[in-house]
Amino acid sequence: MVFSLVYFSLYFLVFLCLLFFWVFRFKGASGYTYIEKELPKVSILIAARNEEANIINCLTAIDQLDYPKDKLEVLVGDDRSQDATMRLVQEFIIDKPYIQLVSIKQDLGGIKGKANVLAQLARLATSGYYFFTDADIEVPAAWIATLLSKIKGKTAIVTGITTVKGNRWFYRMQQLDWLYSLGLMQVVADRGLAVSTMGNNMVITREAYEAVGGFEGIPFSITEDVQLLKHVLQKDYSSSHVYDASALALSMPALSLLDLLHQRKRWMSGAKHLPWYMWTLFVFSFMYYPIWVPFFWYTSIGAAVLIGLLKVGLQSIFIKIAVARAGKTVKWMDLLSLEVYLVSISILLIVFYFLPFKITWKGRQY
């Protein structure tokens, strides 16, 4: 009983602090102002494997970037696709000389999958900035300028925000889940602390990338982006995050529950590379229901329901702001049903994570 009361007191105190910092973000924490007179050349690196359903949308969004084409270098690495991905890219880039298609036919020593493709594309890139995105992502028009504006001093990695498309309830829940998690991370990042990064929406300076030896110079990980961040930070560089509609990339959702579980299991395998304070925050948050459920035995149902409603209410306010800052809208019923989704996915993921199944990603097992 005493432990439960202490936990809930700390939980709501921490959440209220997070909500306060989220509501009253410091000036300049969002948006961008790019003032450099001479825009630098940048490279966009895209790993593509069996993406015939998405690659044209991805490249169309890049073609619509609000950035001079003569300052863009787009390298698309086809990772031995077994569908029409390569043909579609070839047709799309006929009149777009700034986009190059690279056929990836072998693995560099010690790395594979997406990390292998990006490593080989980075060897071909000629600019001082490497932008990473995925073949199922649609980036916003201001993407390049927004992320570049945050590279100052020792800041070597800048990460935007990503959420999923789709109108089905399952897709809308994924969208809110992404924005909620990214909002929490942004609050921590606003305090000047490193959190994480996302390989579908980030930029790294060539200097920092080469300082760690590229993907070839770090241990292989299925979450290559987080591994790269970890080693870049060890070289005394810093990172930054942008939570703004101008940095919002749209991804395809996980189409089925099994796809979602494989995706989250892959993310969890890379979570061990996160800073200790992020682990602490995640574990502390996850403890809520294991403590809340037994609380019924010590108090009245009314008291337990009141605590549950308080959590959902504060959480909904936080997410409502997160969605608005991403330039999106949300229905209150979705905010309420999100709690059912989060609890269900968390329970299923714990079970799935410890099952002896390999992670399936892009048609390969890891």
Image (cartoon, rainbow, N blue to C red):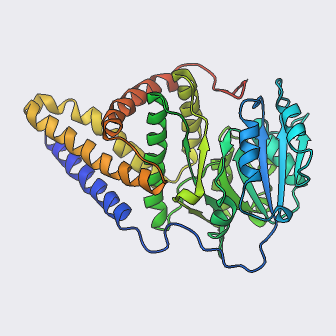
x%, y% of residue 85?
A: 82, 31
Q: Is residue 316 left or right of residue 272?
A: left
Q: Nearer the viewer, residue 181 or 281?
A: 181
**Which quarter of the picture shows residue 214?**
bottom right
Q: How many marks?
A: 0
Above-or-below relation of 219 to 128 = above
Q: Quadrant of the C terminus?
A: top right
Whole-percent x and y of residue 317? 31, 51
The residue lying at 82 percent from left, 48 percent from top is: 119
Judged left or right of residue 321, residue 174 is right
Toward the viewer: 203 or 119?
203
Q: Position of residue 273 (x, y in %)?
A: 58, 47
> As displayed, is residue 287 above or below residue 247?
above
Residue 122 appears left or right of 165: right
| Residue drawn at point x = 89 percent, y = 38 percent | 91
Quadrant in the rendering for residue 236: bottom right
Can residue 184 be seen by looking at this rendering? no
The reply, left or right, for residue 134 in relation to residue 336 is: right
**Residue 311: % across, % down:** 25, 44
Residue at figure coordinates x 34%, y 58% from the top left? 18
* Residue under the image location 60 percent in, 74 percent down: 33
Q: Is residue 68 visible?
A: yes
